[in-house]
Amino acid sequence: MAIFKKETTAPVVVPQHIAIIMDGNGRWAKKRGLPRTAGHKKGANNFRTIADYMNKIGVKYMTFYAFSTENWKRSQDEIETIMNLFQDYLVEALERFHETDMRLVFIGDRSVLKPELVALMDKIETISKDNKGAVVNLAINYGGRQEVVAACKKIAQQVKEGTVNPEDISEDMLSDNIFTAGQPDPDLIIRPSGEFRLSNFLIWQSAYSEFWFDNVLWPDFSVKDLDRAIQDYSKRQRRFGGVK
Ligand code: IPE
Ligand code: IPE
Ligand code: MG
């Protein structure tokens, strides 16, 4: 008689920090004969869905790559649409952040963004800073290499002022001088859209991150796709250079 093993569901480990490269908006629109901007609108809505879901399942930190330091190479029209979508979200977030209890943090160089936008960003960061829910990092005009260079400049300044000894410069000191200071590194980095690269995202923080690449384009990336990524992550053994 055949003995059937009772089906078991492996326990799921919810990563503490998930980072997502929201890529594929343009191709999503092109496939439908729509302008690229339509893809960004759909992508921005999906960001809301996925962020709320991650908060619900207990992800404590999330980072979304929305606009890179290299994305200024795109047309004025496309850039403007992305910035307007960002602004719409900020206005909405001002209302909603008390409901969800999430804390919003902006990572990237905001000095070149429109002053109205920066004022909103500052306001949201301030009013949500004591919220106890998930920390949501939104990467706008973000570049990983630029982030490391900026941290080096800050430390060099302290050396110049005599408050830091060059011998005391450490990994922790660098981590304390980047945008994500005080936060754990991402456990899982997800990139949809079939590209297998980081594109200057979280260069320093990703040293021991796990990766999940998916062919789905970001506007179509669903909670089911996210669940699959988390299930796969749960089966992995992270060794951090040690032996298990
Ligand atoms: C990601 O989608 C959004 C940004 C980079 C701002 P893309 O606009 O890069 O979409 P594809 O890669 O061209 O499909
Ligand atoms: C990375 O996507 C940046 C964001 C998703 C915000 P890109 O579309 O800019 O990356 P490349 O050009 O394909 O590397
Ligand atoms: Mg892209």
Image (tube, rainbow, N blue to C red):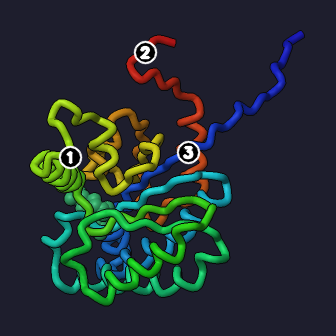
Q: Measuring from the top left, give residue 3's x and y in whole percent.
A: 85, 14
Q: Quadrant of the N terminus?
A: top right
| Spatial separation of the CA atoms under disc 3 and disc 1 | 34 Å
In this image, 101 relative to 240: left or right?
Answer: right
In this image, 194 relative to 80: left or right?
Answer: right
The residue carrying mark 3 is 16
| Spatial separation of the CA atoms under disc 1 and disc 2 | 35 Å
Image height of 10 relative to 204, above or below: above
Q: Measuring from the top left, give residue 146's x and y in whole percent.
A: 18, 55
Spot the residue most to the front.
162
Is label 1 or label 2 in front?
1
Residue 24 shows up from this direction:
no
Q: Which amino acid type is marked by label 1?
A: Thr
Q: Earlier in the sequence, mark 2 or mark 3?
A: 3
Q: Residue at x 26, y 73 (%)?
A: 110
The residue carrying mark 2 is 242
Q: Residue at x 39, y 78 (%)?
A: 121
Q: Which amino acid type is marked by label 2?
A: Gly
Image height of 155 relative to 13, above or below: below
Q: Which amino acid type is marked by label 3?
A: Gln
When asked about the image quadrant of residue 44, the answer is: bottom left
Q: How many marks?
A: 3
Spot the residue most to the right.
1
| Spatial separation of the CA atoms under disc 2 and disc 3 | 21 Å
Tag of residue 163: 1
Q: Residues within 10 Å of mark 3 (few under 14, many from 20)?
A: some
Residue 187 shows up from this direction:
yes
In this image, 111 relative to 66: left or right?
Answer: left
Q: Residues within 10 Å of mark 1 (few under 14, many from 20)?
A: few
Q: Measuring from the top left, give residue 49's x and y in whole percent.
A: 57, 68
Q: Residue at x 38, y 33 (%)?
A: 208
Query: Mark 3: which secondary structure?
Result: loop
